[in-house]
């Protein structure tokens, strides 16, 4: 049944245009948000979603057009001015200070104080209340640096909610959350909506858009291409408006026979995971998914294999040769590569140009003589990789920070393709990128596997796990709870193992191998 939404706009953007050097990010964009509704804004990376959200929050200023709040035209020049009007923005990239506590981050700049002294007890109590509101069970005095990315994202949500905003702008808020954490967030959103708070919700996850949104606004190339309501808010219609065409094969791949053993892990103990030893294999040409809830140990396993975190024991063989990945340098030398979960801080040097970012993974080879990089090779190799990976908007001298999230991810992957590894580790390979860029990453993974590369990837998106994997290793509490071959993959099977029900479930499934 349609919800009763006020016809008077809380916020209205009219003919918004924003230009950056060499590009028009937004052109004549109209958007209205009424009190007590959730409006989803969707589109491919580079469509202008984040730019529009930053303008509405006061981070950026328009070149032309107008923004109205409560019917009055406003000129938002700072985030503080937006906050004074009841507008709060949760950025796509994490924006916390890791050396401060959770409480200090939530109330940064708004700490309770008297006579110049901070009232720490009141700060802790206020933080505890807002954390309880979103169901995040952590102590307010916990350092943010000790939290997982998923929990840091929830702290961002808590900080925005603590401002009692009338309009909450959420830019990819569930990109690092588990299904249960996302469910809690949706409960908070529904509660806020029922109390008259408006939500602008940006997401690439079209399933959650269908679940939570009252209306959908679609952007493509900086322009509005659709206003969807009711029955039109379906996946096919959203995709058609986003990309200008039907995308029918986003989650399909052709599986091929695997080759000889590429990776053999025996009794590996991750110091930052569980004390339980982990054993599994990976064949050439095989794509193996690593599933599990947030905190299950997926990232810890990949980080240990790549030598970022130390191992307490066990053996690792790459191509039959015993290796000791005690550091990323040694792992690279052994033929491994890692596409990390957080491309902005772990996969790229955003201030550097595209060309040196692409060449970073191959600097150990013969392209450095006497400590000097062969710049001719770097230029030619980077130009070829930009074409091979379809990195749009890039050229060798362009700073990587100016690329969209999907194109940044292609740079991370292209960096390792120049290294030509035997085993490619990927942690959330499509986190925060649009449906078109996802399809391109999937095609690249399929092509690499067809050439004989072994790929082990972790993902929180069930569709991705089910569609890409030849096998799935499901983790729970730092252990590999079980293994599922492609013929027996289903969401139910994965979730039974991921939630710790592997013994009772495996006993009913002869094809499930529990380790």
Image (cartoon, rainbow, N blue to C red):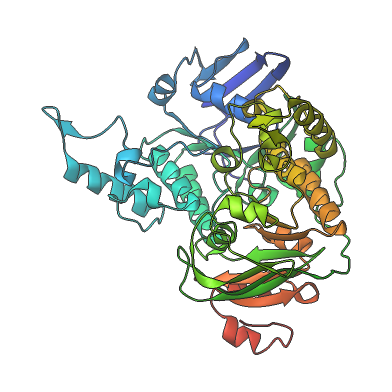
Report whether residue 238 is seen. no
Indicate whether 361 appears above or below 392. Answer: below
Report whether residue 354 is seen. yes
Quarter occupied by residue 159: top left
Horizontal placement of 119 versus 71: left or right?
Answer: left
Residue positioned most to the left = 115
Question: What's the residue at 84%, 60% (across, down)?
Answer: 452
Q: Nearer the viewer, residue 470 or 491?
A: 470
Question: What's the residue at 46%, 36% (across, down)?
Answer: 95
Quarter occupied by residue 425: bottom right
Residue 283 picture location, percent across and down: 78, 68
Residue 139 picture location, percent across and down: 30, 55
Q: Quadrant of the C terminus?
A: bottom right
Residue positioned most to the top = 64
Indicate whether 56 appears above or below 75. Answer: below
Indicate whether 97 appears above or below 263. Answer: above
Report the number of numbered marks.
Answer: 0
Residue 368 picture location, percent across and down: 69, 35
Residue 243 picture location, percent across and down: 81, 36
């Amino acid at each position: 049944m349609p919800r009763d939404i006020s016809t008077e706009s809380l916020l209205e953007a009219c003919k918004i245009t924003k230009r950056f050097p060499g590009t028009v990010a937004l052109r004549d964009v109209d958007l209205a948000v009424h009190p007590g509704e959730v409006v989803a804004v969707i589109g491919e990376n580079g469509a202008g979603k984040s730019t529009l959200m930053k303008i509405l929050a006061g981070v950026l200023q328009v070149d032309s057009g107008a923004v109205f709040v409560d019917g009055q035209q406003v000129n938002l020049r700072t985030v503080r001015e937006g906050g004074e009007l009841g507008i709060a923005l949760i950025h796509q990239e994490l924006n916390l200070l890791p050396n401060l506590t959770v409480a200090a981050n939530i109330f940064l700049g708004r700490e309770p104080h008297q006579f110049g002294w901070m009232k720490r007890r009141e700060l802790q109590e206020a933080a505890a209340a807002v954390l309880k509101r979103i169901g995040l069970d952590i102590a307010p005095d916990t350092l943010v640096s000790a939290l997982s990315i998923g929990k840091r994202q929830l702290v961002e949500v808590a900080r925005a909610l603590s401002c009692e905003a009338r309009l909450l702008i959420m830019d990819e808020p569930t990109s690092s959350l588990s299904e249960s954490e996302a469910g809690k967030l949706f409960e908070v959103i529904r509660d806020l909506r029922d109390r008259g708070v408006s939500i602008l919700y940006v997401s690439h996850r079209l399933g959650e858009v269908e679940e939570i949104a009252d209306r959908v606004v679609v952007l493509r190339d900086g322009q509005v291409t659709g206003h969807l309501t009711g029955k039109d808010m379906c996946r096919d219609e959203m995709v058609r408006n986003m990309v200008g065409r039907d995308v029918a094969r986003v989650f399909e791949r052709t599986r091929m026979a695997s080759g000889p053993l590429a990776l053999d892990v025996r009794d590996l103990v991750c110091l930052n995971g569980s004390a339980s030893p982990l054993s599994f294999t990976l064949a050439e040409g095989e794509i193996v998914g690593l599933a599990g809830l947030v905190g299950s140990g997926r990232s810890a396993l990949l980080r240990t294999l790549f030598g970022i975190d130390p191992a307490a024991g066990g053996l690792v063989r790459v191509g039959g040769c015993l290796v000791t990945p005690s550091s990323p340098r040694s792992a690279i030398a052994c033929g491994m590569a890692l596409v990390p979960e957080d491309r902005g801080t772990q996969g790229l040097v955003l201030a550097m140009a595209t060309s040196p970012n692409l060449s970073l993974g191959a600097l150990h080879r013969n392209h450095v003589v006497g400590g000097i990089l062969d710049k001719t090779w770097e230029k030619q190799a980077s130009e070829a990789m930009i074409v091979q990976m379809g990195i749009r908007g890039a050229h060798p001298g362009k700073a990587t920070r100016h690329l969209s999230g999907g194109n940044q991810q292609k740079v991370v992957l292209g960096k390792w393709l120049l290294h030509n590894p035997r085993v490619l580790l990927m942690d959330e390979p499509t986190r925060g990128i649009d449906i078109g860029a996802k399809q391109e990453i999937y095609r690249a993974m399929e092509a690499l596997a067809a050439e004989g590369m072994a790929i082990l990837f972790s993902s929180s998106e069930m569709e991705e796990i089910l569609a890409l994997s030849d096998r799935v290793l499901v983790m729970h509490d730092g252990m590999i709870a079980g293994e599922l071959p492609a013929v027996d993959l289903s969401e139910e099977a994965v979730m039974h193992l991921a939630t710790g029900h592997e013994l009772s479930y495996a006993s009913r499934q002869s094809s499930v191998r529990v380790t």
